[in-house]
Image: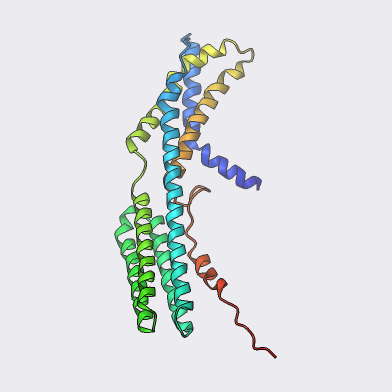
Amino acid sequence: MIFDRFTRIGLIVSWNSLAVAVLAVFATWLSLKLNLIADYPLTIISTAVIFPIVFSIGHAYKRRESALDDYGSIKAHGRAIYFAARDWLPEHDDDRIQHLERILADLLHSCRDMFKGAREDMPANERAVYAAFSELSEFVKRMRAEGLASGECSRCNQYISKMIVAFESVKHIYQYRTPRTLRAFSDFFIVLLPVIYGPYFAHQAIEYEAPVLTYIMPVLFAVILTGLDNIQQHLEDPFDQIGPDDVAINAEKFVELLGCGRPIEKQPAT
């Protein structure tokens, strides 16, 4: 438990936090040496850094929640097709059920490989996903040949259509990020402001009795700004499996739980 907490703190306070903190401390020390004292307003910090980062964090969080909704839609409609193959046909066929389980497993495996993979591998991974969707469509055609009513086949095809829509939505979240110019703007000021505010930290240090307190504020200033930026960066890609808030596609667990809802066969009365 304690180790996990320190690991999560390490995701927020990283090497860039240390680098910016060193710059802030050096700028404060230099300002004291050169007697550069100034009482800057703090509103520029919220305008140049805090507002852009908080906006980006909110947008990245919405993208993550949208990805979770679409991932849930893929799983729910896949399970609905599984129930149709199990319960809607007059005869139970274990081979049919196992075939569908393999198709759904291949689909989720392909989705996971695509969303966790590199951008340059996207064309090949996307073809694997649509190959699984194509096989799922062929499976519905097979159920039609085995006696499934046309209306129920149409409903299964609607399930596949909704799964494809959800996949396309998640694919766009994977492809596109929050505004890059806004991120570049905030990254620039995260490095610049701790240096520019050296005279301000030197001005605040006049009121401190202990010299060591002089450098606490610039370090805290740097850690807060870089910590917010690191949070936004970890939320940016909800599939990279780096932060604890990422979306994990667990194909194995999904397939394992497919048969949990199988009706219990009634034993004949004795």
Horizontal and vertical percent position of residue 74: 42, 62
Quadrant in which the C terminus appears: bottom right
Report the residue at 38% width, 57% height from top.
166
Residue 113 at x, y = what percent?
A: 40, 61
Give coordinates of residue 71: x percent, y percent.
44, 57
* Residue drawn where x is 46% and y is 15% of the image: 41
When asked about the image quadrant of residue 126, the answer is bottom left
Q: Quadrant of residue 56?
A: top left
Q: Where is residue 27 in the image (x, y as percent from the top left)?
A: 46, 19
Q: Which of 61 and 118 is in front in this view?
A: 61
The residue at the point 52 percent across, 30 percent down is: 224
Number of numbered discs visible in the structure rendering: 0
- As displayed, is residue 96 above or below residue 119? below
**In the depicted structure, whether residue 203 falls above or below residue 11:** above
Residue that protrudes farthest toward the right in the picture: 270
The one of 64 and 165 positioned closer to us in this rendering: 165
Q: Which residue lies furthest to the front in this view?
A: 151
Q: Is 187 on the left or on the right of 14, as rendered?
A: left
Side of 264 where 226 appears, left or right: left
Figure check: 72 above or below 32: below
The type of colouring in the image is rainbow
List the single residue furthest toward the left.
123
For residue 104, which quarter of the picture?
Answer: bottom left
